[in-house]
Image: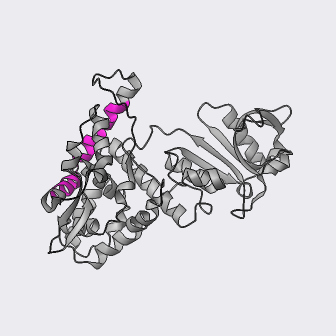
Amino acid sequence: MLECCEPLEIVKDKGISFGKVVCLAHSSGAKVEAFRTNQSTIDDFRKYVVKCSTSDNCHMISTYHRQVLKQTGTGHFSPIGGYNAERDMALILDVARFKYPPHWVPLKLLWDAMDSIDQSTGRRRGFMLISRPHREPGLLYTLSCKDESWISIAKYLKEDVPRLVSSQHVDTIERILYVVFKSLPANFNQFIKWMAEIRRTEDVNQNLSSEEKSRLKLKQELLKQVQETKLFKHVDKFLSSVYEDNLPYVAAKVYCDGDEILSGYESDESCCKETCVKCIKGLGEEKVTVVAYPSGNDVFTALLLALPPQTWSGIKDQSLLQEMKQLISMVSHPTLLQQEVLHLRRQLEMLKRCQENKEDEELSAPA
């Protein structure tokens, strides 16, 4: 879940910028307010320190230059855990406790340490306020940049799909789906990952905690809601009608894992061997390879729902455009599904922002 803006291997090697930490918080579903020192004042900073120090829900993360505090090292992140009003000091809960246990510093000195330039971005450091959302998003789906696949796929979804549907003759929903699926990047199946607690055991009667049972119930309800959408029925019908079994088990493993997570037990490999990535016969004679595991059709559906509505604005047939708008409209969907789709849409926008190296320019959440 912590690899949706920068691969962890890169973070370990080179560190991470303030903008990408903000991106990470947004993408993980937190409510975020972020400020560089040139976007705030020391008086505002003090008010936020007091607010977060007296709240169970609001938390502050500060990024500062260690040398201003006469510490070894350079840029650093740590949460602020308290405020001493009498002495005007902030408590830094240093994440490197082996090096610096929690310690008090004058708030003015901390501000000066934040009011420094990060040489990697040329921008000032700052602080961010994070809080928990009403519910944890990403119950079933999340986007990941664990490898470089997300770069080409984010571009495909945000740039190529709108161009494809506007440049080609599409007169049915089936044709739209064909146009989208026929050009999917080969690494698409790595891009969307199931996110769920995996409890594998030989005993199908698992002893789940009440919290785990509640989350599992939500996941099952969400999957049901996705599969009850009209768009899912189009996707399922399209893929079921045109593909032929052709490619190996391993490419569809991610989808089988999803089934096992929700069903509560581990299936044998034969289910995946029978349904994998497919070689489909297109609407003409052309054959196209797409990822098409039947019980994973909900993944495609969720992603299509998550694309911005303007993705389809280039459809020239007005009646078809209206039909597509109705299929993707959030108004008609249950709240749980709306939240999941909007979470995916937010992640997709944040990934695109990172891809274009704009995460340090724009700190606010996507609209």
Q: Position of residue 291 (x, y in %)?
A: 27, 58
Q: Nearer the viewer, residue 313 or 140?
A: 140
Q: Residue 162's image quarter?
A: bottom left
Q: Residue at x 38, y 41 (%)?
A: 139
Question: Which segment is the magenta one?
Answer: 215-237
Q: Position of residue 59 (x, y in %)?
A: 63, 38
Is 246 included in the stretch rendered in magenta?
no
* Overall secondary structure of the magenta section: helix
Let me know if residue 30 appears in the view. Answer: yes
Q: Position of residue 302 (x, y in %)?
A: 32, 52
Q: Nearer the viewer, residue 95 or 254?
A: 254
Q: Residue at x 25, y 65 (%)?
A: 289
Q: Residue 234's image quarter?
A: bottom left
Depicted 258 relative to depicted 350: above or below: above
* Left or right, 144 with reference to 99: left
Depicted 108 relative to depicted 204: above or below: below
* Left or right, 44 with reference to 11: right
Depicted 354 relative to depicted 259: above or below: below
Let me know if residue 16 appears in the view. Answer: no
Q: Position of residue 320 (x, y in %)?
A: 21, 68
Instruction: Give the image's coloring scheme.
Output: one colour
Give the total number of marks visible in the rendering: 0
Is 222 included in the stretch rendered in magenta?
yes
